[in-house]
Amino acid sequence: MDTYRHKGLRKKLVETIRAKGIKDEAVLRAIETVPRHLFMDSSFVEFAYRDSAFPIAAGQTISQPYTVAYQTELLCVKPGEKVLEIGTGSGYQACVLCEMGAKVFSIERQKLLFDQTKKLLQSIGYTPKLFFGDGYAGQPAFAPFHKILITAAAPEIPAKLLEQLKPGGYMVIPRNSDNGDYQIMMRITKKTDGTLDVEEFDKFCFVPMLQNKSFEGFEER
Ligand code: SAH
């Protein structure tokens, strides 16, 4: 259920992330609209509107609202664009993108999270296309995408995902620093002549984007 109290808490959250530097009004509106408390365990409702990350199933996290807003702002999503997200997790970021008017495709490698999130999003009326599989492979059947958003710490820029990016499109990716202690937010533009333009932004901390691991069950690490 979404109450006036929740709506009030979201307004405050929006003011917090605005004060931290998010300017895009469409992004702020989406954060004000998506009921974040529904993406977390019911016993955590008190925490849903703090600007912090929080544990979800399978040892994963729902990203901090500021981080979600930051990545969404860098993507510059326009209504009708096809956006591929890697790391569905709780589904919160996918729903923020839906609120921006994007056609959202999202991949998750944890079966438990995939199943839970699919059920949740159906019950609250958001309809991104969700896939259980390996984000490194992307979704060639639905490519090309105007925008690609990676929401886990990437050791490298995944080549197959770049292939699935439309010329003129952006990929936003938190790429590991040399020692892997943190991630540097990067925006890669695939120029119309096929070359890449790379911009670097602030430092963040994400759960890892895993490679060559079995899909089933809980986190192995
Ligand atoms: N966007 C999420 C936050 C996700 S945390 C949200 O809004 O809640 C990162 C997610 O990426 C985790 O759920 C993790 O299981 C997933 N992940 C990690 N490596 C992956 C891969 N190779 N392919 C797809 N998903 C991956």
Image (spheres, grey):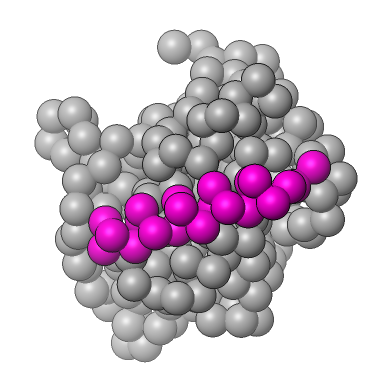
Q: Is residue 211 left or right of residue 74?
A: right
If the image is split into quadrants, where does the C terminus sit?
A: top left
Q: Is residue 162 left or right of residue 143?
A: left
Could you tell me which residue is drawn at 13 percent across and 36 percent down? 178
Q: Nearer the viewer, residue 80 or 62?
A: 62
As for residue 5 lying within the magenta part, the answer is yes
User: Is the residue 87 above or below the residue 74 in the image?
Assistant: above
User: Is the residue 78 above or below the residue 211 in the image?
Assistant: below
Could you tell me which residue is drawn at 59 percent across and 72 percent down? 100
Give coordinates of residue 59: x percent, y percent: 52, 18
Q: Nearer the viewer, residue 153 or 30?
A: 30
Give coordinates of residue 50: x percent, y percent: 44, 38
Q: Is residue 133 left or right of residue 157?
A: right
User: Is the residue 28 above or below the residue 192 in the image?
Assistant: above
Among all residues in the image, which is located at the extreme right?
A: 123
Could you tell me which residue is drawn at 65 percent across and 75 percent down? 101
User: Is the residue 169 above or below the residue 158 in the image?
Assistant: below
Magenta-colored span: 1-21
Determine which quarter of the picture holds residue 162.
bottom left
As for residue 103 lying within the magenta part, the answer is no
